[in-house]
Image (spheres, helix red, strand yellow):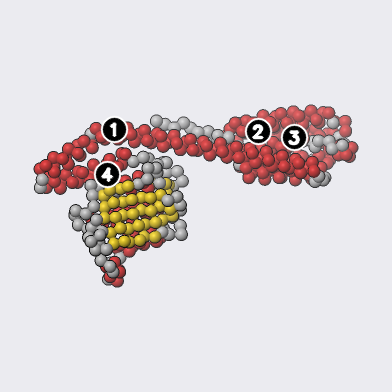
Amino acid sequence: MSTPLIRDPATPLWRGVVLLRVVTWVFALGVGIAHRADFQRPWLAWSVLGAMAAWTLGSSLAYTRERGRRRGLVVLDVVLTTALMLTSPWILSDAQYAASAPLITTVWAAVGPLAAATRFGARGGVLAGLVVAVGTGLARETFDLDVFRDAVLLCASGLLVGMAATLARSSAETLARALRTEAATAERERLARSIHDSVLQVLARVRKRGLEAGGEAAELANLAGEQEIALRALVSSEPGPPGDGGTADLRSALHLLATTSVEVSTPAGTVELPAHLTAELVAVTRAALSNVEEHAGPGARAWVLLEDLGDEVVVSIRDDGPGIERGRLEHAAAEGRLGVVKSIRGRVAELGGTALLDSAPGRGTEWEVRVRKGGGR
């Protein structure tokens, strides 16, 4: 199952910008024709309207294609719009200023901030609105109530369009991630069915017949049983998002440590962490389980528990072995044997977390590892 190519989700907003730019230029042309007799420099007015027409055509052709929606072009859009608007004092007569006649660009100047909002989001839209609003005040040679009203409208429209563009892109990314996860889950289920019908059944049969035969065959049966559990954990664990932003699912990674003597319990959903943090926590868990295998005896069992507490995760590794005598780790460290200190406490300390040991003779050993999800102190 393949996921479709996701185009710019803000494309409908870009089409709206293009349509609005054309409509507002036609309006500006009509205003220019209506006031042509009052302009003090008609030739400059027609030149500005011609430049507006050229920019309307050029920017519209660029904005209709995804490759044309470049940052520099949008910034130039706002700058050029403001510059054309600032020619109004050389075009409008004193009588037109006294009558509060529209500037030469009229409402055409409002399209630049909308393009900035579509490209850069709410902050870009508000900033562009402020730039055009200041240009409006300079062009009118006063900052009165009408100018402040225009500033509020420009900033508000930039804010709303920017929020809509950001929401559209965020929703599209969420949908794309869900489609990728769905595709990965479907493929995992297909592989699980295939493996269950072949490999898992063979391993289960080898384990059963080996235990019945005893002797060396029983040892092979135990190894087959461990591989059966590990393979079942691999094909049954839910895949997390495919590596977006350098993350990895700690839940799935810990499930791969399950054997006939190690039981892993995790939350129902994925536990996404930075990839390096997941790798370090898995290494810490392996080190603790290795100590169980080495010091707790061949019949010892271990339990791994993962808890997701929102801003931090807790990994607990407990066994039913003979436990550790008080002062034994300190004595080993004094003799230069730093296995537990370096492999568990050292790793966790580098992640900015804590590793607490609870053990006593006759009641097993438990490590409680706490690390913030960001991996920092």
Q: In front here: 328 or 32?
A: 328
Q: Name the N-terminal-most of marks 1 and 2.
A: 2
Q: Position of residue 237 (x, y in %)?
A: 34, 41
- Please report contact status of discs 2 and 4: CB closer than 8 Å, yes or no: no
Looking at the rendered structure, the kind of residue marked 2 is Val
Report how many numbered discs are placed on residues in the image: 4
Q: CA distance from mark 2 to mark 4?
A: 56 Å
The mark that comes first in sequence, 4 or 1, is 1
> For the residue labelled by badge 4, is the local secondary structure a helix, a strand or a loop?
helix
Residue for point 17% across, 37% down: 205
Observer-nearest of 49 and 125: 125
**Nearer the observer, disc 3 or disc 1?**
1
> Depth-wise, is mark 2 or mark 4 nearer the camera?
4
Q: Which mark is residue 230?
A: 4
Labels 3 and 4: the sequence-earlier one: 3
The location of residue 368, given as percent across then percent down, is 35, 57
Q: Amino acid at mark 4?
A: Ala
Q: Mark 1 against mark 2, which lies toward the viewer?
A: 1
- Give the labeled residue for mark 3: 107
How many angstroms separate mark 3 from mark 4 (CA)?
67 Å
Name of the residue lying farthest toward the right: 95
Check disc 4: other Cα within 10 Å, few if <14, some if 14-19, many if 20+. some
Give the secondary structure at mark 1: helix
Instruction: Tell me the distance, in whole angstroms, between the alpha carbons under discs 4 and 1.
Output: 16 Å
What residue is pinned by disc 2?
17
Query: Which type of secondary structure does the marked residue at label 3 adopt?
Result: helix
Q: Position of residue 90 (x, y in %)?
A: 84, 40
Residue at image position (26%, 35%) is 195
Q: Mark 4 touching mark 1, by CB under 8 A? A: no
Task: Report which residue position mark 1 lands on.
Answer: 193
What separation in Å lies between label 3 and label 1 (alpha carbons)? 63 Å
